[in-house]
């Protein structure tokens, strides 16, 4: 006999077969699902592993992070060197003695001998790997904090793109909640890296680990960028392959938001679990696709406004749903 599936669906199956008592949070999710889906319109989606424009954007952002990291390193070295030369401060910019031994000391203008520190090198490698895992755990924590009771958070990896991810599949979050979920690892993990690195007085270690971590945050930043550029978006539905964007506002309000280009206030800040069918494998869309089937016929002016909104989205947009 096939074992009963765990989670909300399994609970619902047991309720209908009379083999388990009803649970209030399951009933609340089921009732909220119908109300939510019936009043929301899909604005678009991002298929993370297939959207070439999105992948190009995060690669570009990652390259920019590395460039800014080099600039920050040079500025730090210049500042510390100036303090040493003009204020006689007993400081060196970086811990190159731990990195390269005697050669590192010579590069810093310090006399003496030293051996490279294997602790430094091993901790660097471990820290970079640890930030990847911690990044997803922070996502998962906030996914769970904003989700209804009983929500399941899963983890996965895509070998083709080299990405790992946390997912709260089919949970609908408010716009503000999803932005917090997306940006939380950038703030939390980076702050922790700086606290540890400067605690050991390893500025170079700190810089390298922080840059490595931030270069992996760029997908989250592009999520927020897409949300902030479309004022119609009020809710985001998380999926295993990316995210779907929805609006709970009447059509007239949506078009007004497009014209104003401002952020919108949500009418329902509580996330709900929905059980409408969603892809269980990666999507095939190469774009943020815009669904227009629920909209009334638009005037020429409103069509132009919609086109302007699509250009602001940052990625390609396809009318009528997913591109094939």
Image (spheres, rainbow, N blue to C red):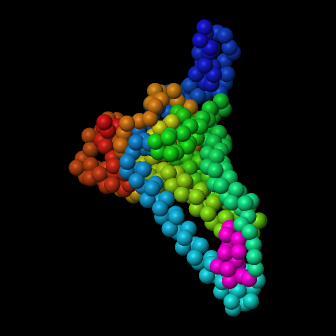
Q: Is residue 90 visible?
A: yes
Where in the figure is residue 197, as x and y percent of width and height? 71, 64
Vertical comparison of 38 with 81: above or below: above
Location of residue 284 (image quadrant) = top left
Residue 286 shown left or right of residue 241 in the figure: left
Whole-percent x, y for residue 250 in the image: 40, 42
Magenta span includes 161: no
Counting from the top left corner in percent of width and height, residue 92 is at 70, 79
Instruction: Decide whether residue 100 is among the magenta residues.
Output: yes
- Counting every numbered tag in the picture gives 0
- The residue furthest bottom is 86
The residue drawn where x is 67% and y is 22% is: 23
Q: Toward which corner of the image does residue 47 lie, by quadrant?
A: top left
Q: Nearer the viewer, residue 8 or 176?
A: 8
Closer to the camera in the image, 321 or 187: 187
Viewed as shown, does residue 38 lie left or right of 85? left
Region rendered in magenta = 92-111
User: With 95 as the anchor, is 152 left or right in this view?
Assistant: left
> Which residue is the extreme one toward the left?
300
* Quadrant assignment for the N terminus: top right
Q: Which residue corresponds to the image point at 55% horizontal and 46% vertical from the top-left?
A: 178
Residue 195 in view: no
- Quarter of the image where one finds residue 194: bottom right
Position of 157 compared to 253: left or right?
Answer: right
Q: Position of residue 83 (x, y in %)?
A: 69, 86
Relative depth, front residue between 250 and 295: 295
């Amino acid at each position: 006999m096939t074992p009963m599936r765990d989670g909300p669906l399994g609970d619902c199956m047991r309720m209908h077969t009379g083999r388990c008592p009803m649970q209030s949070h399951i009933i609340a999710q089921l009732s909220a699902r119908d109300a939510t889906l019936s009043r929301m319109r899909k604005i678009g989606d991002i298929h993370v592993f297939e959207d070439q424009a999105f992948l190009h954007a995060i690669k570009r952002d990652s390259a920019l992070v590395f460039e800014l990291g080099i600039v920050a390193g040079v500025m730090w070295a210049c500042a510390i060197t100036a303090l040493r030369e003009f204020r006689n401060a007993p400081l060196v910019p970086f811990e190159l003695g731990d990195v390269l031994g005697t050669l590192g000391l010579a590069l810093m203008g310090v006399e003496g001998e030293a051996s490279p520190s294997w602790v430094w090198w091993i901790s660097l490698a471990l820290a970079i790997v640890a930030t990847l895992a911690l990044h997803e755990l922070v996502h998962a924590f906030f996914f769970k904090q904003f989700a209804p009771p009983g929500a399941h958070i899963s983890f996965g990896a895509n070998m083709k793109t080299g990405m790992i991810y946390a997912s709260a599949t089919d949970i609908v979050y408010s716009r503000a909640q999803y932005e917090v979920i997306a940006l939380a690892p950038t703030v939390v993990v980076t702050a922790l890296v700086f606290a540890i690195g400067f605690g050991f007085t390893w500025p170079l270690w700190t810089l390298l680990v922080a840059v490595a971590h931030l270069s992996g945050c760029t997908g989250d930043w592009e999520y927020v960028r897409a949300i902030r550029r479309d004022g119609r978006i009020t809710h985001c539905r998380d999926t295993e392959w990316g995210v779907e964007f929805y609006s709970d506002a009447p059509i007239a309000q949506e078009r007004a938001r497009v014209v104003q280009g401002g952020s919108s206030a949500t009418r329902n800040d509580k996330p709900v679990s929905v059980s409408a069918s969603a892809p269980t494998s990666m999507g095939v869309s190469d774009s943020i696709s815009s669904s227009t089937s629920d909209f009334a016929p638009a005037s020429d002016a409103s069509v132009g406004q919609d086109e302007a909104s699509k250009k602001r989205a940052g990625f390609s947009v396809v009318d009528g749903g997913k591109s094939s």
